[in-house]
Image (cartoon, helix red, strand yellow):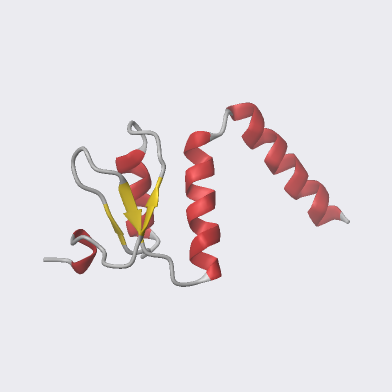
Amino acid sequence: MNSTNLPLESSQVVEVDWSDRWIVYRRLQELHIPSYCATHQPLQVQLSSPTEVIQLWSVIKQYSASRRELIQWLNTCWQAKET
């Protein structure tokens, strides 16, 4: 059994909309971020680096933000790159 499918001893519970919980979980697995998600239970994530924190934030933002917010965020990134 894959160890990422077991409950994590030192993890953070992440508030994610129930309808997005499994897709966020799968994306974290693709990024090799240890996480655990059981039926009718909150998503748990074990973060061990600043990069993983940013990746988690980005994944959650992708599913929780409105289309308008995401467009504004992308425009801000493009403007920051130009300066």
22 lies above or below 57: above
Q: Is residue 55 left or right of residue 12?
A: right
> Residue 66 occupies which quadrant of the picture?
top right
> Residue 19 occupies which quadrant of the picture?
top left
In the image, what residue occupies the spot 48% across and 54% down?
A: 56
| Total residue callouts | 0
Q: Is residue 73 left or right of residue 58?
A: right
Of the 4 image quadrants, the one containing the N terminus is bottom left
Of the 4 image quadrants, the one containing the C terminus is bottom right
Q: Is residue 29 left or right of residue 39?
A: right
In the image, what residue occupies the spot 85% across and 54% down?
A: 82
Q: Position of residue 51 (x, y in %)?
A: 54, 67
> Residue 35 occupies which quadrant of the picture?
bottom left
Q: Position of residue 63 (x, y in %)?
A: 47, 37
**Residue pushed farthest bottom?**
49
In the image, what residue occupies the spot 48% across and 64% down?
A: 52
Q: Position of residue 62 (x, y in %)?
A: 52, 41
Q: Position of residue 46 (x, y in %)?
A: 37, 64
**Residue pushed farthest right?**
83
In the image, what residue occupies the spot 53% across and 51% down?
A: 57
